[in-house]
Amino acid sequence: PSQVVPGADPSARQLCFAWGPAEVLVCESLFGRRGPGRAEPGADRVCFVAGSRDGGPSSSCIFVVRKDQDIYIHTLRKLFNESHGIFLGLQRREEELVGKSRKAQLVQVSKNYRSVIRACMEDMHQAAISARDPALQSQYSTQVSILSAMELIWNLCEILFVEAAAAGPLLLRLLDWVRLHVCDVDNMVREVLSSENPSKHELFWNVVDVFVLQGRMDEARHLLSKEASANPTSVNMYKILDDLMKKMPMPSLGNTQTLTEMELKWQHWHEECQRYLQDGTFASNSHMESICKILLGDEDAILEKKELMTTWYHFLVTRLLYSHPTVKPMELRFYAQMDLFLGGESSPEPLDTILMAAFEFEMHQVIKECSIALSNWWFVAHLTDLLDHCKLLQSHNLYFGSNMREFLLLEYASGLFSHHSLWQLGVDYFDHCPEYGRVYLELHIERIPLNTEQKALKVLRICEQRQMHEQVRSICKIMAMKALRNNRLGSALSWSIRAKDAAFATLISDRFLKDYCERGRFSDLDLIDNLGPSMLLSDRLTFLGKYREFHRLYGEKRFSEAARLLLMLMTAHIAPCSFWMTLLTDALPLLEQKEVIFSAEQTYELMRCLEDLTAQKSDKQKFQDDDVETMKVEMLRLALARNLARVIVKEGTLEGS
């Protein structure tokens, strides 16, 4: 079907587009018309830039066209969420599906899917009733119709393909199918039975006819008994017709009778009906005579009730009930005559085409037509997966290597990834696509907008569970950059460590040190104090961790250990040169302690570091902040000289003693 883009004017401007994973970006352009629009080739698409008549740029609108709009309908969330659980259960039970119980378990899975469709349809129906906006009400009503059609198709596929009902039980299943999905009679029944005199109601015989057409004999006989009570003259006819309806042979679900026995019973019963009709038993009552003709499978008599059946497939099942009750599955194609019912009055709808393909056992055609007719991939993806588990699609591979099941699951999961929360369901569908699922997941998960840290952690956990190391690094880098832009240094450092990105960890460590120089204290102490082995990711991070450890030792008055660590940080050359003056300044309180802390050798090392620092200063740097720098250097030299004198006296005294 054509997609109308509101606001776009194809007659005035060329519409150009670029495909996305689940959306199409459409833009207006003068390319190919009056303006000198130009094409810019990309790796897998062509983007068009609009131009004005005089060669300059002009204003142009950009539209986003979603490929799978249904996933944004809130009331369909139940369909996606609950069917996801059924899908996963089926994949996990694959090894358990063996022996005779396999078919029964697959039929139960199919019923579970149908129950989800029906529950969602009922919710949508209630939403349509309560909606006040006419447009919204129309949207909900449309979705109810679509869901109803989906259940109708699925139920038929369950009977024909999943359960593969044999001759006999097949007819009973088809009768249940028609009764479940043709509900118009229920309102008529309530109206007739609630009247004072049901047999005199204008719809009385319509309701009786519908019951007969659907094979609901007990209910038809109950209504006819009311006619007999009201009209004593028709009692004899009623008793005969009631006896015929009561004795009508029906197939059994168990193995209580063979098909041959069933056919013999049905033949005798058919002959009895024929005899009463030929004898003119019901000639005085056209309604009962019409019912007798229907019991005989008279095609014309059944077609006269076309308006009561409303659909050609209802006509098919009624015709089989009274003409071929032991029809075999592969014979259905010969009796499914849509044209006979429609009579050229109307053309087949997409639903008719799909059901006809199912009756003809063209499974691939059913899937193809559903893919075209339905507005999302949910139906075909789950139905194909179920049929694949039934071993019915094993021989059908697509030209690019993936089978039909995987192709449809990939399409469905790709659509889920365009939704802000349903993408989590898509992950599990990709997991169960052995050939291309991993590749699709890697491509789609990189496009998830990481709006919050909670969402990022969720995506990260998914990637880590699947050993997607490249995606893990990418996510951590993105989150680290976001945190750094917001000046959240602790979070940025945590993400860079998780990404094992040494360069970025170095950059953030520098920011921490710069922040310390400006504020005189560290932020995010808990993170820095608990870096552990992670500090070995980069030299600068190691320095940050060790420098924080120096402050902790100093605060605990463990001066000797603090002094050794400070000297190690300078002599190991892992401290940035710009930070040397800060380290030397940190040594001042230790040099001024009453107790001598630095040895002579350590003091000489500190002196050497100070001289190296002053020698490295350029002329420009030497005169910048000259008074402050000069004062610091002089104070350090004085403190180092005094400490050296004290330590020489101390060490000399110790040697002398």
Image: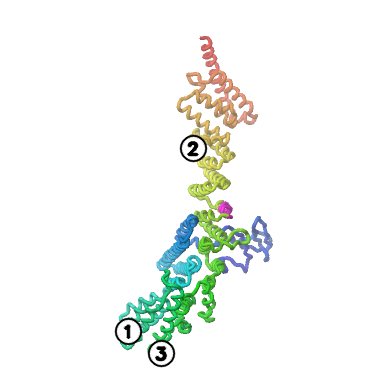
The structure residue drawn at horizontal position 38% and vertical position 90%, both measured from the top left corner, is 284
Q: Amino acid at mark 1?
A: Ala
Q: Which residue is mark 1?
A: 228
State the SS at label 3. loop
Between circles 2 and 3, the one closer to the viewer is: 3
User: Does 442 appear in magenta?
Assistant: yes
Residue identified by numbered label 3:
279
Q: How is the image coloured?
A: rainbow
Quadrant position of the N terminus in the picture: bottom right
- Residue 155, horizontal then vertical, whole percent: 47, 68
The reply to whether residue 69 is in sight is no
If you read the primary sequence from the N terminus, does the residue marked by circle 2 or circle 1 appear first?
1
Magenta extent: 435-443
Residue 537: x and y in percent read 56, 37
Majority secondary structure in the magenta region: helix
Label 1 Cα neighbours within 10 Å, binned few <14 / some 14-19 / many ≥20: some
Mark 1 or 3: the one toward you: 3
* Place of residue 228 in the rendered image (x, y in percent of width and height, measured from the top left): 32, 84
Please say if 555 is above or below 479: above
Give x and y (percent) for residue 2: 57, 69
Identify the mark nearer the N-term, 2 or 3.
Answer: 3
Q: Which residue is mark 2?
A: 527
SS at circle 1? helix
| Residue placed most toward the observer, 625 or 234 | 234
Could you tell me the amino acid type at mark 3? Asp
Instruction: Determine the secondary structure under disc 2.
Output: helix
User: Label 2 amino acid?
Assistant: Leu
**Above or below: residue 300 compared with residue 59:** below
The reply to whether dot 1 and dot 3 touch (C-beta < 8 Å) is no
